[in-house]
Image: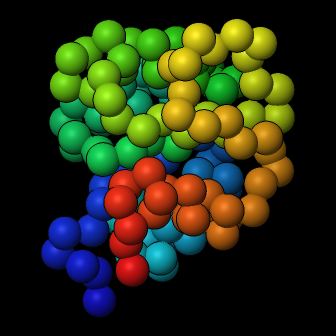
Amino acid sequence: MADRKAPKVLVVDDEIMIALSVAEHLADEGFHVVVAHDGRQALDMARQEQPDAVVTDHMMPRMSGLEFACALRADSGFSAIPIVLTSAVPPANTDGIFTEVFAKPFQLSDLTHLLRKLLGGGR
């Protein structure tokens, strides 16, 4: 049973199986999850869904994770939102754009722990 105040997490990855795996795990752990498959879709989804945190891949078509995160940070409503980057090849210089960077592959339990920490607990 989902908590009525479950934190909402936007998961962004162009690899559908990765996105679904992360989303399913987070949902099983009590988060409300929405999914996008590229940076442009994610930007629209973030504005529509108002997530509490974002987990995004870096290398994606149409708009990279870095471009997406920069655009999101430029919106005053998202300037302080936790953004976790997941990437096999993270960008060299992110200048504090991301709250945390996870190298792929990563443990889903580690991601869950981090999100709970960033969002103030959870169950």
Number of residue marks:
0
Q: Is 112 drawn above or below residue 8 in the view shown?
A: below
From the top left corner, tell me how far across and down residue 93 is, in percent. Answer: 70, 10
Left or right: residue 116 versus residue 74 is: right
Q: In this orientation, which residue lies closer to the viewer: 104 or 12?
A: 104
Q: Is 29 drawn above or below residue 42 in the view shown?
A: below
Q: Which residue is depicted at the point 77% across and 12% down?
A: 92
Q: Which residue is depicted at the point 51% across and 19% down?
A: 97
Q: In this orientation, which residue lies closer to the viewer: 59 or 54?
A: 54
Q: Is 70 drawn above or below residue 52 in the view shown?
A: above
Q: Which residue is depicted at the point 22% across and 40% down?
A: 50
Q: In this orientation, which residue lies closer to the viewer: 1 or 16?
A: 1
Can residue 44 be seen from the camera position used here? no
From the top left corner, tell me how far across and down residue 59 is, in percent. Answer: 69, 24
Left or right: residue 20 versus residue 89 is: left
Can residue 112 be seen from the camera position used here? yes
Q: Is 29 drawn above or below residue 12 in the view shown?
A: below
From the top left corner, tell me how far across and down residue 13 is, in percent. Answer: 59, 40
**Residue at far bottom of view:** 1
Q: How is the image coloured?
A: rainbow
Toward which corner of the image does residue 88 lie, by quadrant? top right
From the top left corner, tell me how far across and down residue 57 is, in percent. Answer: 63, 34
Q: Which residue is depicted at the point 57% across and 65% down?
A: 113
Left or right: residue 97 versus residue 90 is: left
Q: In this orientation, which residue lies closer to the viewer: 87 or 117?
A: 117
